[in-house]
Amino acid sequence: MGAGGKAANAKARRAARVSLWVARASTTVLLWTCVVLLAAAFGERLAPSVLGGVWSGCVAQTLVIVQRPLLLPPDGERVVATAATSTAAAAVPLPPKRIYKNNGYLMVSCNGGLNQMRAAICDMVTVARYLNVTLIVPELDKTSFWADPSEFKDIFDVDYFIASLREEVRILKELPPRLKKRVELGYLRSMPPVSWSGISYYHNQILPIIKKYKVLHLNRTDARLANNDLPVEIQKLRCRVNFAALRFTPEIEELGRRVVQILRQNGPFVVLHLRYEMDMLAFSGCTHGCSREEAEELTRMRYAYPWWKEKVIDSNAKRKDGLCPLTPEEVAMVLKALDIDRSYQIYIAAGEIYGGQRRMAALTSAYPNVVRKETLLPSGLRYFQNHSSQMAALDYMVSLESDVFIPTYDGNMAKVVEGHRRYLGFKKTVLLDRKLIVELVDQYKNGRLSWTDFSSSMKASHTSRMGAPSRRQVIPDKPKEEDYFYANPYECLHQPDELSAL
């Protein structure tokens, strides 16, 4: 064969190979197109598959939800599973993803302590769901009094949070690159939503802004959704986020279980949410029992923080109105009057008590088994020091597990834990009537009331204040004064027949 013939044959073979490659590529594209169309048509019924994490044509890594026991049972026998233990046995399928037209992106910055932020996260997830927008994982407060640098992922299991809510709302860890760059260049609309708003406010006022700017940043989130007059589906989604999606990190859960296990081995325990820390006393202006030097120190602190708006406070008047945290001495009297067994462990869920051991003397004398997480795990908390929200998360877990939970002030932790204990089966939570208590304490100390009468009055007044099923008190146009949704989310609770009929 001549040189010309060989060249022609070589050219023909190359053409055949190119044709074969094109045919294979076309077939592959066609097959993948069919798969994508089927996935769009049948949704997550094809999962688990290589498209299990797809959103808008982008392939993402499929995440397997691993169920961990949230709480330790009373017998304390359950051990903590490590990442290496039987993942296949514990894994459950991802919920089907909700497909919707994305109206934009919502960024939120939470403010306050852990439990104020926890409630805000629940509200913002709900708002994002009903506006059909994409929520960016909330930013936690790092500039408040506690100056905790913790990120969302340092406290909550962020991957579980995103995956467990995917059938309700799309949640991303950060904005898509193009929008992220715009935000970094300063093109971001930021605003605080109106407090105690209904869902119609977000539809009529917030959604148009999101559609216009594509990204909206809500820079305050505390109490921005109403307690009442919301569709039951909205209330139930708030509960789902709170009780199911917001799971602490494995490290926090492991330490929480260890604390509970130690307590359970030593018998029943009461969690006392003793809000007698320096910042709370300074903020509230409550100085009963403090020395003159201490009262002046607290006043200086109150004036040092401009966002604490109330400066001139009559401590005695406020205490008589029941608006002050109970002192450790008053708490000791209350526990004795309610016949809390002296042998019970009293777990202090709080920061550093103002006045230290001197101020705690009356309580520790009446109840010698007063403990804290720092005494139960002296070497186990080193990575949590100077991270107040992570320490508060440990207290939250222990509070849920306690035989009795007693808050001494109506803060956010007191309310959110109260609601969570109702959800867990109306576990006993003593809701102290502080106004009556200080009146009875003063009468007893002044000799106008015997101990028998003091104890009888205390028991009688708190019989109906143990966290039993009830309806929220609704006060039209006064949302700050009515019952807080997260303290009693009765729409989400298994209620007795007589209450359900109301």
Image (tube, grey):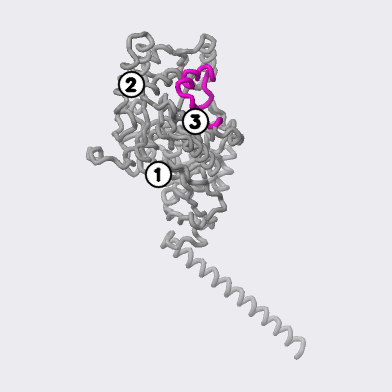
Work out whether 20 lies above or below 316. below
Residue at 37% across, 28% down: 430
Residue at 49% across, 30% down: 113
Q: Position of residue 332 (x, y in %)?
A: 43, 21
Q: Earlier in the sequence, mark 3 or mark 1?
A: 3
- The disc placed on residue 140 is none
Q: Find the magenta span and give its range.
A: 350-375
Q: Does dot 3 land on a helix, a strand or a loop?
A: loop
Work out whether 138 lies above or below 429. below
Quadrant for the N terminus, please: bottom right
Residue at 43% across, 30% down: 270
Cβ–Cβ below 8 Å for labels 3 and 2?
A: no
Q: Earlier in the sequence, mark 1 or mark 2?
A: 1
Other residues around mark 1 within 10 Å, as few (<14) / some (14–19) / many (≥20): some
Q: Position of residue 127 (x, y in %)?
A: 41, 41
Work out whether 245 lies above or below 448. below
Work out whether 450 lies above or below 229. above
The span from disc 3 to disc 2 (Cα, nearest Å) is 31 Å
Residue, far bottom: 1
Please tell me whether mark 1 or mark 2 is closer to you in this view.
2
Q: What is the three-letter code of the residue carrying label 3?
A: Gly
Quadrant for the C terminus, please: top left
Total numbered labels: 3
Q: Which residue is mark 3?
A: 113
Q: Position of residue 46 (x, y in %)?
A: 45, 63
- The disc placed on residue 458 is 2
Other residues around mark 2 within 10 Å, as few (<14) / some (14–19) / many (≥20): many
- The disc placed on residue 240 is 1
355 left or right of 470? right
The span from disc 1 to disc 2 (Cα, nearest Å) is 36 Å
